[in-house]
Amino acid sequence: MNIILLGPPGAGKGTQARHLVDTRNMVQLSTGDMLREAKDSGTDMGKILADVMARGDLVTDQIVIGLIREKLSGEKAGGFIFDGFPRTLEQADALGALMASEGQTLDQVIEMRVDDAALVERITARSTCGGCGEVYNDKTKPIPADGKCTNCGKENDFKRRADDNEESLKTRLMAYYKQTSPLIGYYYAKDMLKVVDGLASIEEVQGSIAGALDG
Ligand code: AMP
């Protein structure tokens, strides 16, 4: 089964994708993670990406479609979770064409619906383990007192993203509403959309997504 997790920054796409990887042997394809890797490569392209991403704007369709194309032809998995992709109608069309050319189908799109005010709070409190990507939140899931990641045990390697600040978040939210939210209608019309309440607890959202996938 191949699925898309759709939702604004901070909706919990990454957290839920990691759970699906652990429990269903799926492969997470996060364009944000791929771009952060490319950004840290020290190349000229990396510098351009760093600027665009720090502002909170979208990287060009051509670049992200290229990244996904490489992954789709390279990996054969029990199922892909597209996390943070597609983010524009052009990317959505490209994904449909790529999947068809690989003989694959896109099965479901899960929209994680959340309230804007909650996003600011979530994002500005967020940090992740540099070892495994486990997500922490200063209020709801603080970094353990012994400094060891609860998932992988790595010590004192917690990172905050450069774009997890209020100003970049506003740009990221605007990009979501202007460029990405039309995908809700796009996939609804294709009869692929399921909506879950992204404001519920992590476990409840896990349950709703499982219900959507297995229902
Ligand atoms: P994310 O980790 O998904 O929040 O993505 C972080 C940043 O990477 C975004 O704010 C964009 O600058 C860029 N990005 C990630 N995925 C895409 C995409 N599908 N299209 C364009 N830009 C993207």
Image (cartoon, helix red, strand yellow):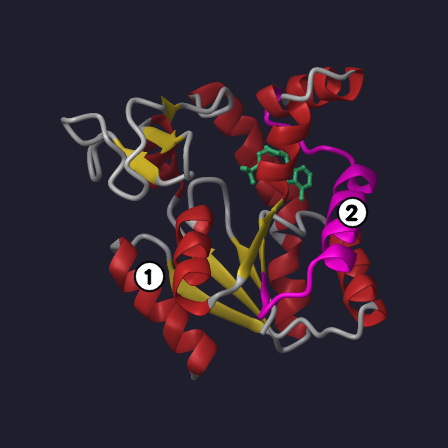
Please give the name of the residue rendered at 66% of the width and 23% of the height, measured from the top-left corner.
Answer: 39
Return the residue nearer the eye: 192 or 105.
Answer: 105
Image quadrant where residue 121 sits? top left
Could you say which disc has been placed on residue 65 in the image? 2
The residue at which mark 1 appears reads as: 205
**Quadrant location of the N terminus in the rendered image:** bottom right
> Does 58 sit left or right of 198 as displayed?
right
Residue 140: horizontal and vertical position, in percent? 20, 39
Residue 120: horizontal and vertical position, in percent? 37, 32
Q: Which of the marked residues, 2 or 1, is nearer the chain's N terminus?
A: 2
> Does 29 sit left or right of 48 as displayed?
left
Q: Which residues are magenta?
A: 55-80
- Vertical relation: 26 (above or below) 164: below
**Quadrant location of the C terminus in the rendered image:** bottom left
> Does 183 sit left or right of 64 as displayed?
left
Residue lying farthest bottom? 215
